[in-house]
Image (cartoon, coloured by chain):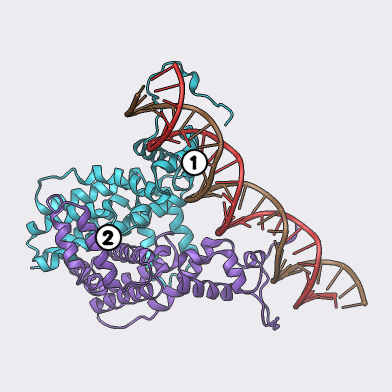
Chain colours: A purple, B cyan, C brown, D red
Amino acid sequence: MAGTGRGEQGGGERRTDALSKERIVDAAIAILDAQGESALTFRALAASLATGAGAIYWHVANKNELLQAAADAVITRVVSDESTREAPAAIRAIASGVFDAIDAHPWVGGQLLREPGQSAVMEILEGFGEQLEGLGVPERDQFNAASALVNYVLGSAGQFTAGARINPEGLGRTEFLARVATRWTERHDAATYPFAHRAAAQLREHDDREQFLAGIDILVAGISTLR
Amino acid sequence: MAGTGRGEQGGGERRTDALSKERIVDAAIAILDAQGESALTFRALAASLATGAGAIYWHVANKNELLQAAADAVITRVVSDESTREAPAAIRAIASGVFDAIDAHPWVGGQLLREPGQSAVMEILEGFGEQLEGLGVPERDQFNAASALVNYVLGSAGQFTAGARINPEGLGRTEFLARVATRWTERHDAATYPFAHRAAAQLREHDDREQFLAGIDILVAGISTLR
DNA sequence: ACAATATTGGAACATCGTTCCAGATGTGTC
DNA sequence: GACACATCTGGAACGATGTTCCAATATTGT
């Protein structure tokens, strides 16, 4: 068996078109951003890099690792941008950053939900966790509080991403939400779903980002009661 | 077709093995529960029903519709079990029900995140929403509050489901979490990730359900400050 | 210059969701 | 009972995907 050991790239320059995990991940992100999750195939990726599938597998174990690396690349930039603000504002800033990243790269949302303990998720957990001391949260509650924030962010990310996946790209977000609302209202009885019908009305004039941050504020308010 | 006859059944009675969407969904749930998400293929489903793929497509449009129907079937039973308790307890009860359903059928978590506006999700939203009046939440904040609860539940569901997908089925949940914790601790610096390292320690002795409900309590506490 | 290793490109494989269609089954009419 | 028609079934076939395999090429070490 030939050694499968990974060669370190030493100091010598190589051919300028040499593949690398970084170049592959960048190409993958470009495809994901431009054409969406379903467009990322090893054939499309190989074509984009002017190579074959086998060459890509030399640098990347499988598609899952590729997606994780892509998601990490996007999220790490956001969270490491650590602000030295007051605790509540810092939490809001981190959440905002994650939201914006997912807004710009909708596929990230789905990926974060797929693998727990993934570095991107831990990065977010770390970012939130470090702020809890400043809120006066006792240590025994800090893990629960940070988890709640992370799970809320991931759930929101999933819903948002799923929306983007369905939206035929033609409609704006508000137009799209309006269509979802009317379709749902038509199909379900207002008597058995009183709340959902009121919610559908608000859906038309709501702003995703505002609603997301309102949820963060609710969580922060709840966390502040832990003492 | 080479007469693979069931004509030799004898009795001219109406065939007892007639397909229906309900029977198909039940068979799908059985496969999902027993062997996990990746085991549900149209070939396996056809074999389980002793028929062909084409026959299934006569009753079900595609795999997505099948998964939605399966998830709806599981969730609807849980939420419609509406309790007439006080608001905070009712919210806790609904969340518990969803958690238990996903605990028993891990694949449901992933499915709920895939399609927004799905009936199962709206059912949960309705369940939470109806309790908010009792908490004294002003109408303009009710949609945000209910959304926060739903997004938190879905995020938690996703994390929990993802864990079940990775776990090789051999280990118990605690053992599995311990392994995740040590692997992460070994790979990452305690200096740059102080909080995550403390969290990893707690991960070993934590209970998923308790942590999930702790998050619900945080949200309820935060929602109660909206007046 | 030569051997050994690292990397590439693309053919080949197994599997999946889905489509297609010939035949079997059921229903209504005389 | 015989015929026509719509409903339903079973399985072969299609196109696409992730992945593996391997002969060919590029790079490195001596």
**Image coords of residue B152 (percent x, y):** 27, 60
- First in sequence: mark 2 or mark 1? 1
Instruction: Please tell me whether mark 1 sits on a helix, a strand or a loop.
Output: helix
> Could you tell me if residue A227 is visible in this image?
no
Q: Amino acid at mark 1?
A: Ala
**Can marks 2 and 1 be said to lie on one chain?**
yes
Kindly identify which residue carries mark 2.
B152
Q: Nearer the viewer, residue A75 or A202?
A: A202
Mark 1 sits on what residue?
Answer: B53
Residue at left 22%, top 62%? A182
Q: Quadrant of the rendered structure where residue B219 is?
A: bottom left
Camera-side residue of B62 and D6: D6
Chain under numbered label 1 = B
Q: Position of residue A192 (x, y in %)?
A: 14, 49
Left or right of C26 on screen, residue A29: right
Q: Count residues near mark 1 (Cα–Cα under 10 Å), then give few for <14, some for 14-19, many for 20+.
A: some
Front position in the image: A34 or A116: A34
**Residue B214 shows up from this direction:** yes
Say which quarter of the image contains residue D11.
Answer: top right
Quadrant containing the C terminus of chain B in the rendered view: bottom left
- Residue A32 drawn at (x, y percent): 48, 70
Residue A104 left/right relative to B120? right
Instruction: Count how many numbered circles sit on residues in the image.
Output: 2
Q: Is residue B78 above or below residue B227?
A: above
Give the mark toward the camera: 2 or 1. Answer: 1
